[in-house]
Amino acid sequence: MRHLVLIIPIVMLVGCSSAISPAIQEYTIYPASDQAAPTVAHSSKILRLSTTKPLPSLASRNLYYLKDGGESGSYLYTRWSDTPAILIERSLSSALHEQGLFTSLLTPTSAAQADWVLESDLNAFYHRFETGQKSAGVIDITYRLIDTKTKLLISSKRFRIATAAASEDAKGGIDALTLATRELTEQSTRWLSIQVQEKK
């Protein structure tokens, strides 16, 4: 009996140490390479893409979800390769480079002088669940286009994108937000094309 008493705790310890947490899955959003070229004349302006200002809760690489009643949280074993703001900035920058809408695009840290600057505030980037509806990837962002010489606002626009998720889990949220980001890139590029046309 004395030996049995000693063996039982050892077996329990071995069982606990063999429990392994699931590996964290990391995802990124690759810029779409099939963006249609703008139908307006290209601009001679130099544009600076300012750093996007996210809500504090969106400053991490977590994949967040939001449910009815205000319940929110993040998926334990899923995250982005970069913060949502960076993923959006990279997608827009790639599209603008590919289309050649501006003479040059400057990063926020560039010392060169720009004609226009594009500021943005990111207010939502999450997997949303609503009772009786399919979940969706939701983005809410506001852009402001500013003339750097006059310091005046040229135009501003709020974009609210919701793309249905194919599944009610983390992977469904990832795929839906990827599609929503590409839709945002298309719509915001089209909006910038209109500003270029109007300010020729």
Image (cartoon, grey):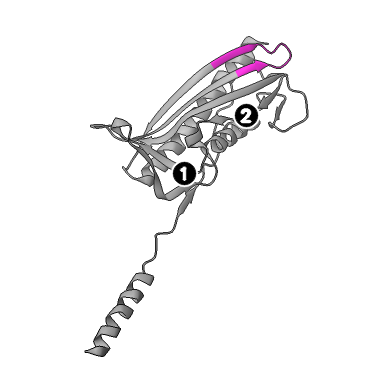
The quarter of the picture where residue 126 lies is top left
Where residue 140 appears, as percent x and y from the top left, is: 46, 26
SS for dot 1: strand
Q: Quadrant of residue 163?
A: top left
SS for dot 2: helix
Q: Quadrant of the N terminus?
A: bottom left
In this picture, is 24 found above or below 6? Answer: above
Residue 182 at what x, y percent from top left? 49, 33
Q: Amino acid at mark 1?
A: Asn
Q: Residue under circle 2? A: 96
Q: Which mark is residue 62?
A: 1
Residue 98 lies, in percent from the top left, at 63, 32
Residue farthest along the right direction in this orientation: 112
Q: Is residue 135 magenta?
A: no
Give, as a single range, the part of the protein colored magenta: 145-156
Eye-nearest disc, 2 or 1: 1
Residue placed most toward the observer, 8 or 19: 8
Which is more toward the observer, 78 or 54?
54
Q: Residue furthest front?
A: 2
| Visible residue check, residue 115 | yes
What residue lies at 64% left-to-right and 15% top-to-bottom?
196
Q: Residue drawn at (29%, 32%), measured in percent from left and top?
A: 68
Residue 148 falls within the magenta-colored stretch: yes
